[in-house]
Amino acid sequence: MARMHWQSMGLAFGLGLGAMVGLASPSFGGPAVASRWQNAKMSQEECLKRAEDTIAKAGLGRLERTEQSRYGTKEDYTGVVRCITSNGIARFIGSDPSRSVADNLSGMLFRNFKTE
């Protein structure tokens, strides 16, 4: 009888542990995020203007503005272009529940921005 009690406790522990691991799996996690960067030897104003054009060209809407960034969203995904011209760089961030969509979006922003 005592052996059966310990077996059922072990089963309950195993099921509980399995549930915790399942909840921590990537399929239940937050959105995937991918990023790229490139040199941006230009003024902050020029970079932010180019960021807005880049976001529009990617088909993202609902443009949001901050001092260093421009954000665009469409459905479940978000694209960000961050201008840090004091350090000579622009960052491109894509976010979506799917890692491949996030990576493709950051790549599209990177290519659309193009600095010469």
Image: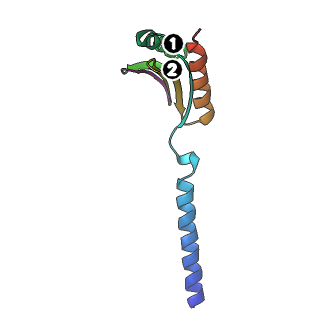
Side (left or right) of 42 relative to 102: left
Indicate yes or no whether the magenta region holds residue 80: no
> Can you give x and y, in whole percent of width and height, for residue 71 in the image?
44, 22
Q: Which residue is mark 2?
A: 90
Task: Residue at 50%, 18% (x, y): give it.
Answer: 88
10 vs 75, nearest the viewer: 10
What amino acid is found at the position of numbered circle 1 in the picture?
Answer: Lys
> Can you give x and y, in whole percent of width and height, for residue 6 in the image?
56, 83
Kindly give the residue lying farthest to the bottom in the view shown: 1
Disc 2 element: strand
Q: Which quadrant would the N terminus be assigned to in this image?
A: bottom right
Task: Residue at 52%, 14% (x, y): give it.
Answer: 54
Task: Residue at 44%, 14% (x, y): give it.
Answer: 48
Q: Earlier in the sequence, mark 1 or mark 2?
A: 1
Disc 1 element: loop
What amino acid is found at the position of numbered circle 2 in the picture?
Answer: Ala
Task: Residue at 36%, 20% (x, y): give it.
Answer: 67
Q: Quadrant of residue 21?
A: bottom right
112 vs 6, nearest the viewer: 112
Task: Using the image, determine if residue 26 lies above or below residue 58.
Answer: below
Task: Using the image, determine if residue 103 lies above or below residue 23.
Answer: above
Q: Are marks 1 and 2 in contact (CB under 8 Å)?
A: no
Q: Which residue is mark 1?
A: 41
Kindly give the residue lying farthest to the front in the view shown: 87
- Which color scheme is applied? rainbow
Side (left or right) of 103 relative to 40: right
Which stretch appears magenta? Answer: 67-76
Indicate yes or no whether the magenta region holds residue 72: yes
Q: Nearer the viewer, mark 1 or mark 2?
A: 1
